[in-house]
Amino acid sequence: MTILHYTGYDHDRGGIASVIRNLAATDRFHCVLGVNAGCVQQGRPRLETLELPPIEGERIGLLNLWRARAVALAVQAWLKADDTRVFHGHSRAGLLVGLWLHWFGERRVVVSVHCYGRQRWFYRWAARRLAGRLYWLTPAMKRHYGCADQTWAECMPDGLTAPLPVAMRRGPVEGQDLRLGGAGALVRWKRWDLVLEALARLPDGKIRFTHIGEKLATPESHACEQELRVLTEKLGLADRVQWAGWQAGSGGLLQEVDAIVVPSDGEPFSMIALEAMFAGVPVIATRGGGPEDFIVDGENGWLVPAGDAAALAQRFRQCLDPAAWRSLQLRPEHLRKFSLSETLAARWAEIYAAL
C-alpha cells in the first residue's frame, strides 16, 4: 500500500512530521508526504513528497474549507490512479480534505486528530461523518472534545520504532546539577515561562534547563520567543537556561538530561515525552492532556497541576533528592502500547487494508 500522509504544511518540521517518519520507518507501507508547493525538507530521512494546492495547514474556517476542496480534487485523482493508495490526513487541513473526500464518495480515507481545537462541536460532527475513520490520540483527547465514549476505542497514539529501554535514568550523580530538557515550538500554550518561573524559585543554581525548538512563522510565536528571552534575563537565569534552537532530532538532548519537562496547558500528546520514555528518561508533565494517558505518576515520571509554577518548582526541588528516583521503574507492557514495531504499525496496516 502507498499512504499519502497529508499535512498541508510549507515545512516538514515538528511533531506530526516525526510521527510520519516513524510510520515510514516501519517499512510496512510506502509513505508519501503531502505538502504545499515549495516545501523544503529539513528532517531526516527524506520522504517522497506530493505537492498539492496551497492551504493553511492549521486553520479551520470557510476560506480554508474552500481551499481544501481543491486539494481534495487533486488527491482524488491521485487515489483513482492506483487502488492500493490511501489518504491519511494529519493536520486541521488534513481533516478538511478528508471530509471533502468523504463527500466525494472516496472510502480510502482516514484522519488522525493531533490537536486540541477550539471548535469542539466541529470535531465531534466530523467524527460522526467519517464514521470510524477518524482517530484520536488518547482518551484525554476524547475528553477534551466531549465525546460520549472516553475509552481507548478509536484511539491511535503516536508511536516509535525504538527498542524498549533496559533501564531508567536515576537522576544526577551526587554533587552534580540536575539537568532538565524541553522540546517544542516557542508558543505561549507550551508554557515555557512556567519553567523559568519555577527555576527562579530555586536560586541555589543546582538546576539547568536546555530547550530545543524554534519559533513558528507567526507574530504570536515571534513575540513569545522575545518574551522568553527577556524573562530569562530578568529572572537572572541566563547562566542556567539555554535556548538551543531547532535540532534535527532529540537524541542529543535525551543523552544529556536527567528528565524532560512538558509544562503545556493541555498538551495533546507530546512526542518528546514519548521519546524520553523510550530512552528511559523520566518526564515531568502537567495534568490535563495526553501525557496523563501514558505517564504513571511516580513510576515513569511525575505529573503536576497545570499552570502552577510553585508546584513545578517543588517537583524540581524534590528531584534534587536521590530518594525521589528510587520508585521509578520500567513497565515494558505499558511501553508496548506505543511501539510501532511491536503494536501500532500492525494496527495501522489493518486499518489501511480495511479501507
Image (tube, helix red, strand yellow):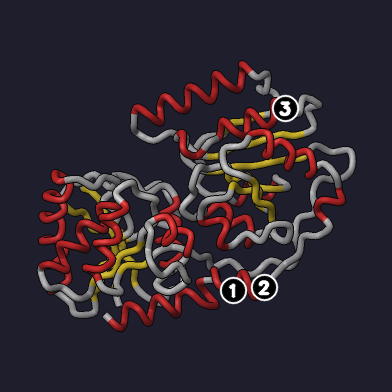
Badge nearest the viewer, 3 or 1? 3
Residue at (57, 42) in percent of width and height: 306
Q: Which residue is mark 1?
A: 336
Q: Nearer the viewer, residue 174 or 163?
A: 174
Depth check, front residue: 2 or 201: 201
Do the residues under discs 3 and 1 have CB atoms within 8 angstroms? no
Q: Looking at this rendering, what residue extends furthest in the front direction?
A: 148
For the point 65% across and 19% down, the residue is 235
Between the C-alphas of marks 2 and 3, the distance is 36 Å
Task: Return the residue nearer the eye: 110 or 152.
Answer: 152
Question: Could you tell me the amino acid type at mark 3?
Answer: Arg
Residue with the most extreme right position: 174
| Element type at mark 2 | helix
Vertical arrangement, residue 199 with respect to residue 190, above or below:
above
- For marks 3 and 1 on the same chain, the one whose residue lies earlier in the sequence: 3
Q: Nearer the viewer, mark 2 or mark 3?
A: 3
Q: Are marks 2 and 3 in contact (CB under 8 Å)?
A: no
Quadrant location, the N terminus: bottom left
- Quadrant of residue 182 in the image? top right
- Residue 201 tag number: 3
The x and y percentages for residue 221 are 40, 31
Question: What x and y, as percent, mark residue 35?
Answer: 26, 52
Hey, what amino acid is under mark 1?
Arg
Name the spot of residue 353 as percent of width and height, x first: 31, 82
Q: Which residue is mark 2?
A: 332
Q: Real-space Cα distance between discs 3 and 1?
A: 38 Å
Can the viewer see residue 225 in this picture?
yes
| Neighbours of disc 2 within 10 Å: few (<14), some (14-19), many (20+) | few
Please tell me which residue is depicted at 45% across the width and 75% down the height of the picture. Answer: 345
